[in-house]
Image (cartoon, rainbow, N blue to C red):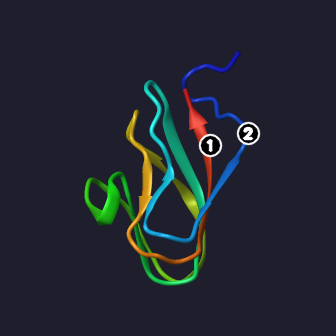
Amino acid sequence: MLYKGQYHPGHTAHATSAGALVSGEAGVSYIVTDVITAANNIISTAGAGAGDVIMRATAGHSNLTTPIKVAEGSGIFQSTSTSTTIVYHKDQ
């Protein structure tokens, strides 16, 4: 059993078009630890860069030394139709 603050093993999500990378789940926060994107991109909690901006990713690899926690129940979206992969953990 995991408690709040204990992370599940890492997951990856990949997309090549603007929109959802990870759908939100009730009672779950996501911890983003790694972003790889082929072009500058806005990673946010709603489509088209709306909602809360999680990060403004530049083209290339962003290995986050400080992970970013996404609000509970929020999904993770990208604003650009480009190849993007993220590594995230579930915090339940």
* Mark 1, other Cα within 10 Å: few <14 / some 14–19 / many ≥20: many
Looking at the rendered structure, the secondary structure element under dot 2 is loop
Q: Residue at x 50, y 84 (%)?
A: 39
Looking at the rendered structure, the secondary structure element under dot 1 is strand
Q: Residue at x 54, y 46 (%)?
A: 31
The correct choice, above or below, for 49 with respect to 1 in the image is: below
Residue that label 1 marks: 89
Three-letter residue code for mark 2: Pro
Measured Cα–Cα span from mark 2 to mark 1:
6 Å
Q: Quadrant of the C terminus?
A: top right
**Viewed as shown, does residue 3 lie left or right of 11?**
left
Q: Nearer the viewer, residue 12 or 82?
A: 82
Residue that label 2 marks: 9
Asked if labels 1 and 2 touch by Cβ distance under 8 angstroms, the answer is: yes
Q: Nearer the viewer, residue 55 or 50?
A: 50
Q: Residue 72 at x, y = what percent?
A: 40, 34
The correct choice, above or below, for 9 with respect to 77 in the image is: above
Q: Quadrant of the N terminus?
A: top right
Q: Residue 26 at x, y = what percent?
A: 43, 26
* Mark closest to the chain's N terminus, 2 or 1: 2
* Mark 2, other Cα within 10 Å: few <14 / some 14–19 / many ≥20: few
Three-letter residue code for mark 1: His
